[in-house]
Amino acid sequence: MINFIKGILRDKDFDNVTVECGGVGFNIFVTNSCMASLPSVDEEVKIYTYMHVREDEMSLYGFVSPEEKKLFLQLISVSGVGSKTAIQILSAERMGEIVKSIVDEDVRVIAGCKGIGKKTAERIIVELKDKIKPFDYILPTDTMYKVVDNSYIDDAVTVLTSLGLSKADAEKKAKAVAESNDTAEQIIAKVLHNMGE
């Protein structure tokens, strides 16, 4: 598997680019965010990649970051979601919005992507909501989520479930109140305070 390609950007088209590396020109289908981050033609570039291989096709898909590639891999793990569909989803919305919609079980965001129906959006959410950890997808420029230590969220959820909340409800409430530098105890206290109001 080709994890990334580093070389000279030779061409940019609507949804794909050509990168020359070792005398070979690699054609890579990229997300909108990856395209927007690219330098001018004939400059050096590094693109994280996934190679899709079938009997009749071998394609490279490119991403702006390891986090975006990881979300792509999560999406294509869903039954009925192929590489092209996953690229469409990643190109239609910011990564943080997609992750948030899955965690919050908000079908509208994904269903609103071109070519994605409500049933597919619901299947993505059902299959990924317990696998996705929002803080694994934070980029330095992404302000969709507050920066909180993931282990504190997990610890808070453990305590909250022992107090009778469902895991899904505990996660939702903990993530909603967590602020930067909060400890697990502070997150738990905020959740319990909100529940008592």
Image (cartoon, rainbow, N blue to C red):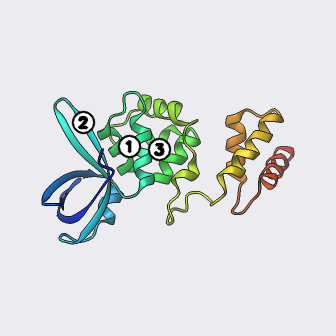
Question: In what element is the residue under mark 1?
Answer: loop
Residue in the picture at 22% in, 72% down: 43
> Of the residues tagged 2 and 3, which is closer to the observer?
2
Using a 10 Å C-alpha cutoff, classify the residue at mark 2 as few (fewer than 14 neighbours), some (14 to 19) or many (20 or more). Answer: few
**Number of marks in the rendered image:** 3
Question: Could you tell me if residue 156 is visible in this image?
Answer: yes
Residue, disc 2: 53
Check disc 3 and give the amino acid type.
Answer: Val
Left or right side of 126 for 88: left
Residue in the picture at 20% in, 65% down: 9
Left or right side of 174 for 30: left
Residue, disc 1: 113
Check disc 1 and give the amino acid type.
Answer: Cys
Question: Could you tell me if residue 94 is visible in this image?
Answer: no
Coordinates of residue 30 in the picture (x, y in percent): 28, 53
CB of mark 3 within 8 Å of CB of mark 1? yes
Say which of 149 and 105 sits in front: 149
Q: Which mark is residue 183?
A: none
| The N terminus, quarter of image | top left
In the depicted structure, whether residue 8 falls above or below residue 25: below
Coordinates of residue 138 in the picture (x, y in percent): 53, 57
Question: In what element is the residue under mark 3?
Answer: helix
In the depicted structure, whether residue 112 falls above or below residue 150: above
Question: Which tag, 2 or 3, sits closer to the chain's start?
Answer: 2
Say which of 26 and 38 sits in front: 26
Coordinates of residue 113 in the picture (x, y in percent): 38, 43
Label 2 to label 3: alpha-carbon separation: 29 Å
Residue, disc 3: 109
Residue in the picture at 46% in, 34% down: 124
Label 3 to label 1: alpha-carbon separation: 7 Å
Using a 10 Å C-alpha cutoff, classify the residue at mark 1 as few (fewer than 14 neighbours), some (14 to 19) or many (20 or more). Answer: some
Check disc 2 and give the amino acid type.
Answer: Val
